[in-house]
Amino acid sequence: MSIVNFDKCPLCGNQVLPVGKPFTNSKQSTVIAKPSSFQIHLLLDNLRSTLNVGSIFRTANCAAIDHIYCCGTSPTPSHTKFLKSGLTSEETVSWSYHRNALEIIDDLKRKGFDICSLEVTCQSSSLFTQISTLKSRNDVLLVVGNEVSGIDPGILDLSDSIVFIPMLGSKTSLNVSIAAAIGIYVKRFSLTNSNFKV
């Protein structure tokens, strides 16, 4: 194992001296208020990767998601690998584990939630087209599914809408954590008052 000397340039070997102020990431001084009064919950249907789940939790924190349901085989924050991508987001995001996602969906439908599944099917419409036609102002449950097999067909049958993210390149899908992030932010800000300012 080689030791890197940070005092010398690795190309020319000359002495390296610090110049100017040290770089720091900008930080917001205050946490902005949640942008809408509508609840957005997220259901993870049989995900496989703990790193994907951790990344989704971190995005959920940033977008002020109200609750995450880890269902079926989906790892939870108690997994040892969660911290690597979750970065302690489980401490600020409400979550619970459930074996049967259909029971959760049935309960939320009775409470008036709109069930929106993020999946490519023959009945899917574009997530971005749906924004312009969105009339509902109900609470929303966004469902994302298994990295290989997608969302359980039983969940799709109970969904009020099924949406997909258009692909412009040669690949036909995104990583589930990236897809979830797009869906989360589109849902969050499509239910937001247009006067909301960051």
Image (spheres, rainbow, N blue to C red):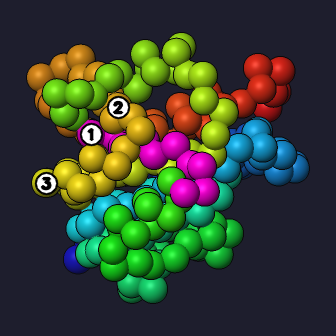
Q: Can you tell which quarter of the image residue 123 is in?
A: top left
Q: Can residue 172 be seen at all in this image of the molecule?
A: yes
- What percent of the width, then of the height, locates residue 151? 24, 52
Secondary structure found at label 2? strand
Which residue is the site of mark 1? 119
- For the N terminus, the quadrant is bottom left
Left-right relation of 123 to 187? left
Circles 1 and 2 in contact, beta carbons < 8 Å:
yes
Circles 1 and 3 in contact, beta carbons < 8 Å:
no
- What percent of the width, then of the height, locates residue 26? 74, 43
Q: Which mark is residue 84?
A: none
Which residue is the site of mark 3? 149
Q: Nearer the viewer, residue 106 or 55?
A: 106
Give the CA separation, mark 1 to mark 3. Answer: 10 Å
Q: Residue at x 39, y 51 (%)?
A: 143
Compare marks 3 and 2 and give the one earlier in the sequence: 3
Q: Nearer the viewer, residue 27 or 173?
A: 173
Question: Given the image, on which type of amino acid does mark 2 rest?
Answer: Val
Question: Given the image, on which type of amino acid does mark 3 rest?
Answer: Ser
Compare marks 1 and 2 and give the one earlier in the sequence: 1
Question: Given the image, on which type of amino acid does mark 1 rest?
Answer: Glu
- What percent of the width, then of the height, locates residue 50? 33, 71
Which range of residues does the magenta coloring cover?
A: 110-119
Q: Residue at x 36, y 67 (%)?
A: 101
